[in-house]
Amino acid sequence: MGIQRTMKALADPTRREILHLLKSGRLAAGEITERFPVSAAAISRHLSVLKEADLIRDTREGKYIYYDLNTSVLEELTLWLAELKGESVT
Amino acid sequence: MGIQRTMKALADPTRREILHLLKSGRLAAGEITERFPVSAAAISRHLSVLKEADLIRDTREGKYIYYDLNTSVLEELTLWLAELKGESVT
DNA sequence: CATATAATTAACAATTAAGTTAAATGTTAA
DNA sequence: TTAACATTTAACTTAATTGTTAATTATATG
């Protein structure tokens, strides 16, 4: 989905913190919201940006929507970085 | 100087392209400007953002200011990514 | 010194981003 | 079906970002 979306998504500190939270396992939107001093609507928007960037995935279970980390995009970013650093990325 | 500055700097496509140009060696501000369809002022601003993020370094030589890549910050970002991916970063 | 060149900074316009509150949607259960 | 809850979407505000042109700073040279 392109490095641009990924980078833009990672450029916000709240979104990066959300990713770190999800490192320990999936969380529902509300559980994520609890951990930040902003509205549920704001978190929902951040989640949609992360999802557009394919950095997270969502699954609805009843009235909850669970989010979990998708590391494959981070893999791509790591390659991009390695390439920039001049490491052989073959 | 913090991941925030780094990420913000990398979130712009022109700035990422500047970094890639510098991979092949240092360039003067004017030489960089030539390769983009924007004004010298705009490029100058991008260069200052990259410099604030410590992603590039500058050296004046006479009337030219040369810019070159600083990969140490990219190293830090790589660690940050590895950590998020759950790789042991000790 | 006066002028030309390289680059940055200033001032402004347009766009994008992030937050708020309120309304809408989807789901569960009385 | 209605009420309650979880979450998203809409409308709006404010702040930040990106670009433009014009002015400024720094250096070199006739």
Image (spheres, coloured by chain):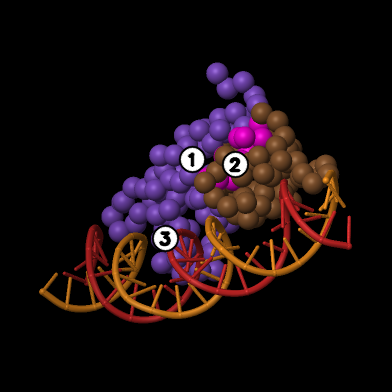
Chain colours: A purple, B brown, C red, D orange
Quarter of the view holding residue C21? bottom left
Question: Which residue lies under the disc numbered 3?
Answer: A45
Between the C-alphas of marks 3 and 1, the distance is 20 Å
Question: Which residue lies under the disc numbered 2?
Answer: B34
Between the C-alphas of marks 1 and 2, the distance is 24 Å
Residue at the image point whose x is 34% and y is 57% from the top: A64
Tags 2 and 3 touching, CB below 8 Å: no
Q: Along the horizontal axis of the image, is A14 left or right of B47?
A: left
Which sits earlier in the primary sequence, circle 3 or circle 1?
A: 1
Q: Along the horizontal axis of the image, is B84 left or right of B51?
A: left
In the image, residue B20 lies in the stretch drawn in magenta = yes
Quarter of the view holding residue A84? top right
Q: Residues within 10 Å of mark 1 (few under 14, many from 20)?
A: some
The part of the chain drawn in magenta is B13-23
Q: State whether residue D28 is above or below residue A38.
A: above
- The answer to whether residue A33 is seen in the rendering is yes
Question: Which residue lies under the disc numbered 1?
Answer: A3
Q: Chain of mark 1?
A: A
Q: Residue B52, percent across and down?
A: 72, 52
Look at label 3 and name its amino acid.
Answer: Arg
Q: Which marked residue is nearer to the observer: mark 2 or mark 3?
A: 2
Look at label 2 and name its amino acid.
Answer: Glu
Of the pair A10 and B14, the residue shown nearer to us: B14
Quarter of the view holding residue D6? bottom left
SS type, badge 3: helix
Q: Chain of mark 3?
A: A
Q: Along the horizontal axis of the image, is A24 left or right of C9?
A: left
Q: Which marked residue is nearer to the observer: mark 1 or mark 2?
A: 2
Q: Residue A74, percent across and down?
A: 52, 37
- The answer to whether residue B46 is seen in the rendering is no
